[in-house]
Image: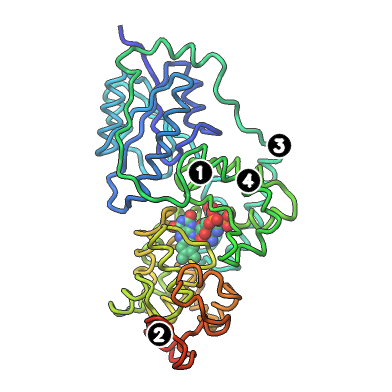
Amino acid sequence: MSVPTTLIWFRQDLRTDDQPALQAATRTGRLLLGLYVWPNDSALTARRRYFIWQSLRDLQARLAECGIPLHVRTGNPVQAVAETAAYCHAAEVVCAANGAGQGALRAVLEKQGCRLHGVADGLLQPPFQFIRSPYFNEPAFAAFQVAWRAACAEQYAAWQAPAWPPPDLAAQQKRLPENLKTAALPAVPRAVLTIPGGETAAQRQLAEFLPRLPYYPVLRSLPAQHGSSQLSPHLVFGTLSVRRVWAVAGNSPDAAAWREALARREFWRHYFRQYPDMLQQGLPEHRAAAGQANQVLMAAWQQGITGYPLVDAAMRLLRDTGWLPHSLRRFCAAFFCRVLGGRWQDGADWFARQLLDFEPAANSGNWQLAAGLGGKRVERQPFNPVVWSQKLDPDGQFIRRHLPQLAHLDSRRIHAPWLATAEVNTNGYPAPVVDYRAR
Ligand SMILES: Cc1cc2nc3c(=O)[nH]c(=O)nc-3n(C[C@H](O)[C@H](O)[C@H](O)COP(=O)(O)OP(=O)(O)OC[C@H]3O[C@@H](n4cnc5c(N)ncnc54)[C@H](O)[C@@H]3O)c2cc1C
């Protein structure tokens, strides 16, 4: 006789700690199974795929301790979930509902007598409450942050993560039929990751960062110092709970700047849920005035051969590791739009193909801001890449690390090697592709 089960469909919530889908599934009292469906996504780079794989391996081990098998499928998600639900006689499928319509899945499941139960995850506050204007410049963010923070302060003042696992779960799961107990995880090609995947790695990284929190406000703007948490891929793939992150940061003045970063993450996600058309197209006011970088300039920027050392060091690091600190993302984006005259969409596309932590809302929003397109009018402070290079990397340490052919230049010339006299060897480093002063 078949035993009714509950299927937990893991999506971008690849963890056991503070996991709403897992908690909701446990409350059903049925036997539990997990499922992950690999996305059919051409944007899933080898690095991202390997990060997910590491996260699944960790999740599988954690779930196995409680007797929950994690099945892994590929293909169309609706079909894969429905087939697995039928195979394991699921009476209910529980998953994070990320706002995208799940009507098709619900309809298919209902036909086979199975209920779809969506739970909220990934945000500290529900969307559609705090965005008051179609603009997303600094004043709009400031207004959002005041209201949003007040709601978080109230809701999370005494927050405790729900307990996991329930004490009798492993014993109960022994009743799972043998054919459902085994779940394989096919290997994927290895990729070099500077930020490893998985809940265990995420928790370790969070613990290592917390003692450095007091230095965050200063060091986050100095890319040579590794001053930020590097938790972004974990927050994107849900190997870490954002509620957990908010709670451990605490209320101290040291934590304020870091909590502001979390507010920015949330701001973009709320904003584009409310204004989805802006994700690709931007504000209507600015649609006609898009720039167009020529292909040669765009290729030089992508490959890190623009002749501007900090841009090139950063763009090579992005290509080689899939990660950049925020200050360099902003710098490279501003350079692309304002010095090379590129369209923000083209730059955002390149970042989307490189970033380990690619997330459409954060990427699109930050690109549009860097291009000065968050308000009614174009908002552009003068942008001097040499002055910014000196601010972000005062003694050239970051440039020296990533462009060794310029390592011998002094701290002034290293930001503008074209000023070096003919006797100084710049080892074939290219001349600037454009003169920033002409822009
Ligand atoms: C052009 C550009 C593109 C970007 N694309 C992405 C992207 O695709 N995915 C992504 O997660 N972030 C993106 N960001 C935001 C930000 O740069 C990264 O989140 C941050 O660098 C991650 O480093 P961290 O984890 O050390 O951040 P920390 O400084 O330690 O901040 C903690 C967390 O807050 C969030 N966060 C911080 N700053 C921002 C911000 N300005 N916008 C949104 N979230 C923020 C991230 O989740 C981050 O992990 C982009 C920024 C720019 C300028």
Q: Residues within 10 Å of mark 2 (few under 14, many from 20)?
A: some
Spatial CA distance of label 1 from label 3 is 19 Å
Q: Quarter of the image containing the C terminus?
A: bottom left
Bin the neighbour count of mark 1 within 10 Å (Cα to Cα): few under 14, some 14-19, many 20 and up.
many
Real-space CA distance between mark 2 and mark 1, rounded to the nearest whole angstrom: 42 Å
Which-is-in-front pick, marks 2 and 4? 2
Point 48% across, 66% down: residue? 329
Report helix, strand or loop for mark 4.
helix
In the rendered image, which residue does mark 3 sit on? 158
Image location of residue 236, percent across then percent down: 46, 48
Who comes first in sequence, dot 4 or dot 3? Answer: 3
Q: CA distance from mark 2 to mark 4?
A: 43 Å
Please tell me which residue is depicted at 62% across the width and 43% down the height of the picture: 207
Camera-nearest residue between 215 and 418:
418
- Report the amino acid beneath label 4: Trp
Mark 2 residue's CB less than 8 Å from ligand 1: no
Q: Residue furthest top?
A: 1
Q: Ligand 1 near label 4 (Cβ, under 8 Å)?
A: no
Whichever of callouts 4 and 1 sits on the residue coming sooner in the sequence is: 1
- Image color mode: rainbow
To which residue does mark 2 refer? 432
Tag in front: 4 or 1: 4
Precedes in sequence: disc 2 or disc 4: 4
Q: Which residue is mark 4?
A: 246
Q: Do the numbered discs 2 and 1 sit on residues whose CB atoms are within 8 Å?
A: no
**Labelled disc at residue 122:** 1
> Residue flagged by tag 2: what amino acid is it?
Pro
Residue type at the position of mark 1: Gly
Dot 3 falls on a residue whose secondary structure is loop
Q: CA distance from mark 4 to mark 1?
A: 12 Å
